[in-house]
């Protein structure tokens, strides 16, 4: 780039328009077009591709607080969406620095080209610190992100579109990202010497209800000795039980748990009552709480990052966790036969539960990480131990 190019003032090729009418200008990246959603911020310093493909982000525009996103490029391995052909559902991304050319041996594509191929609209050159400070002060705003290489924007129409977006509360988005067909899963976790492996069978037959499940959850279940069958979000309790599973897994996923719970909580309640070991993560945790009689609330700014400290009340240990949620279980709403097992050390919010008279437990955070620390991998063993105990 010549000095003249570097200093010339170019018109904005992307806009982030908040529902309060604020207009933030920047450089467009990824797909062109207009996309609406709720703006959250994620504080993870690595793993942007896994974040961008986590189906739990459907309906959301992610602001990365880490300034250099894209510098290790993109590849086919670091994708968390189970169905490679489908988009994760994310509505856009907001970056600080312009994406540089990738510098990593695993890179197969420039992140910009990868975003375009997946239909994700993005904007860079944004003061993401200021945006994050605003979200912390006022809560998560609805917004529209627009990208046009010629810089032709109807700003008033974009403001109206941002103001009209209904918001995540009341939205059931799980059905849209769930598998429509039951399918088996046998890939095991990544090993540095040979990459991903394939499991032959497994000691425990597990069915995973897919509300937007991440690949690494399935890999860690397989790794822990489970033979996994993935079922669509709306599968009935009867159909789940017809598989005669040793255990049932309830996945993460996007949207409002209360809206998704309208069909899933009935199923979950029946499964727990039968005494089959049940393990839930994130949306699965929230819906387990709802099934047990608890309630969920919308959080002020949510928890999205890879360094959230959580205390395990049963052992007193603190684990550093990966989180991605904008709703939370109200710990005080849990009935007497449900114990609060984990709490966030950032704000005291509920991060885990255990049913005292049935083999069922769940956590609000992401023990599979991807991206994030591996402190909480022990929970997959806790699930297989539960299945082993139930057998004997
Ligand atoms: N990661 C998840 O499963 C997210 C759960 C839910 N959609 C929330 O935002 O709280």
Image (cartoon, rainbow, N blue to C red):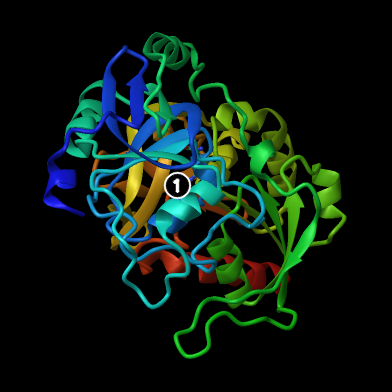
User: Would you say 336 lies left or right of 149 here?
Assistant: right
Q: Is mark 1 within 8 Å of ligand 1?
A: yes
Q: Secondary structure at mark 1?
A: loop
Q: Quadrant of the N terminus?
A: bottom left
Res. 250 visible in picture: yes
Quarter of the image for residue 340 reads top left
Residue lying at 55% horizontally and 70% vertically, measured from the top left:
220
Tell me if residue 167 comes above or below residue 192 in the rendering: above
Residues 160 and 136: in front is: 160
Residue lying at 18% horizontally and 38% vertically, measured from the top left:
129
Name the residue beneath numbered marker 1: 364
Residues 5 and 390: in front is: 5
Task: Return the x and y of residue 260 as percentages of the image width and height.
Answer: 63, 32
Task: Return the x and y of residue 138 as percentages of the image width and height.
Answer: 25, 21
Q: Badge 1: few (under 14), some or many (20 or more) residues near its Cα, within 10 Å?
A: many
Task: Return the x and y of residue 245 as percentages of the image width and height.
Answer: 77, 62
């Amino acid at each position: 780039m010549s000095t003249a190019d570097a200093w010339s003032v170019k018109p904005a090729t992307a806009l982030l328009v908040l529902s309060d009418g604020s207009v933030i200008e920047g450089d467009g990246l990824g797909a062109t077009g207009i996309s609406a959603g709720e703006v959250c911020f994620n504080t993870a310093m690595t793993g942007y591709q896994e974040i961008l493909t986590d189906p739990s982000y459907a309906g959301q525009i992610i602001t990365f607080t880490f300034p250099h996103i894209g510098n290790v490029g993109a590849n086919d391995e670091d994708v968390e969406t189970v169905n490679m052909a489908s988009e994760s559902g994310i509505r856009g991304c907001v970056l600080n620095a312009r994406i540089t050319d990738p510098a990593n041996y695993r890179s197969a594509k420039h992140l910009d080209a990868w975003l375009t191929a997946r239909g994700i609209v993005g904007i860079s050159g944004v003061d993401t610190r200021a945006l994050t400070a605003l979200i912390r002060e006022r809560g998560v705003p609805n917004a529209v992100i627009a990208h046009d290489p010629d810089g032709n924007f109807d700003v008033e129409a974009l403001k109206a579109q941002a103001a009209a977006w209904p918001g995540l509360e009341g939205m059931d988005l799980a059905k849209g990202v769930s598998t429509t067909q039951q399918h088996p899963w046998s890939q095991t976790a990544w090993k540095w010497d040979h990459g991903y492996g394939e499991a032959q069978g497994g000691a425990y037959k597990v069915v995973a209800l897919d509300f937007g499940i991440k690949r690494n959850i399935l890999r860690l279940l397989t790794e822990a000795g489970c033979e996994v069958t993935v079922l669509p979000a709306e599968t009935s309790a009867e159909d789940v039980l017809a598989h005669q599973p040793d255990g049932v897994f309830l996945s993460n996923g996007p949207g409002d748990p209360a809206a998704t719970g309208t069909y899933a909580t009935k199923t979950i309640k029946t499964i727990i009552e039968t005494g089959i070991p049940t393990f839930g993560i994130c949306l699965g945790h929230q819906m387990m709480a709802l099934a047990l009689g608890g309630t969920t609330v919308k959080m002020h700014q949510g928890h999205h990052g890879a360094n959230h400290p959580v205390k395990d009340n049963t052992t007193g240990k603190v684990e550093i966790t990966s989180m991605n949620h904008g709703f939370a279980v109200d710990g005080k709403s849990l009935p007497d036969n449900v114990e609060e097992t984990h709490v966030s050390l950032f704000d005291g919010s509920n991060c885990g539960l255990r049913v005292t008279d049935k083999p069922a437990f769940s956590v609000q955070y992401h023990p599979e990480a991807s991206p994030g620390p591996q402190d909480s991998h022990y929970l997959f063993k806790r699930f297989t131990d539960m299945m082993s105990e139930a057998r004997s």
